[in-house]
Image (spheres, rainbow, N blue to C red):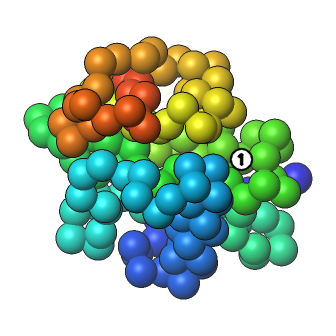
Amino acid sequence: MGWTIEQRDWDDAQGEALRAAQRAELDARYGTDDHEPGTPPSAADIDVFLVATDDAGEAVGCGALRRLGPGTAELKRMYVIPASRGSGVATALLRALEAAAVARGWTTVKLETGPAQPEAIRFYQRCGYREIPLFGPYVGSELSVCFERVLPSP
């Protein structure tokens, strides 16, 4: 199966539906809707938002980048619908986001996930991310596990 990965506006309807599905899944995993320390991403602070669609045009995944500082971005709202997990679309999305970061001169991508998301932790580790101390708004959070990857030079 092939995918199309394209940049979209943050308020794109398919992107909003994916983010709503992600929120519902995380609310169920954590048993609360209060599982995100820090400021939720918005159109005002997201630099890149990508949506992956399948051959039928159905949205199957998304991910975003928010600039943290010189050379560093944070991965936000990385999500793939359950039916498409294990298909390779998550890796394709992540690599497309990393390419977008490199194109902007960013050298490092950081991210936060949580202990109730072991599949995500394994995924990021397989993709070359290493666990780092909690950063920024996640410092002191018992629901956060943070990772980063220094990106290859272009």
Q: Amino acid at mark 1?
A: Val
Relative to 58, is 61 on the left or the right?
A: left
The residue tagged 1 is: 89
Q: Residues within 10 Å of mark 1 (few under 14, many from 20)?
A: many
- Residue toward you, 146 or 116: 116
Residue 92, position in %: x, y?
64, 42
* Farthest-out residue, left: 70
Is 60 above or below relative to 99? below
How many dots with numbers? Answer: 1
Left or right? Give the position of 97 relative to 125: left
Residue at x-position 64% and y-position 30%: 118
- The one nearer the camera, 7 or 64, is 64
Picture residue at 43% right of the left edge, 28% below the top: 145
Q: Which residue lies most toward the bottom here?
A: 13
Q: Residue at x 34, y 17 (%)?
A: 132
- For the question of whether residue 116 can be seen, the reply is yes
Please indicate whether residue 95 sits to the left or right of residue 64 in the image.
Answer: right
Please tell me whether mark 1 sits on a helix, a strand or a loop: helix
Residue at the farthest right position: 1
Q: Eyeballing the image, is 80 above or below 69?
A: below
Relative to 124, residue 45 above or below? below
Q: Quadrant of residue 2?
A: bottom right
Whole-percent x and y of residue 28?
64, 58
Q: Quadrant of the C terminus?
A: top left
> Is 16 or 100 nearer to us in this picture?
16
Quarter of the image where one finds residue 100 = top left
| Res. 109 visible in picture | no
Q: Looking at the image, which is closer to me, 53 or 133?
A: 133
Q: Quadrant of residue 115?
A: top right
| Residue displayed at 32% across by 42% down | 74
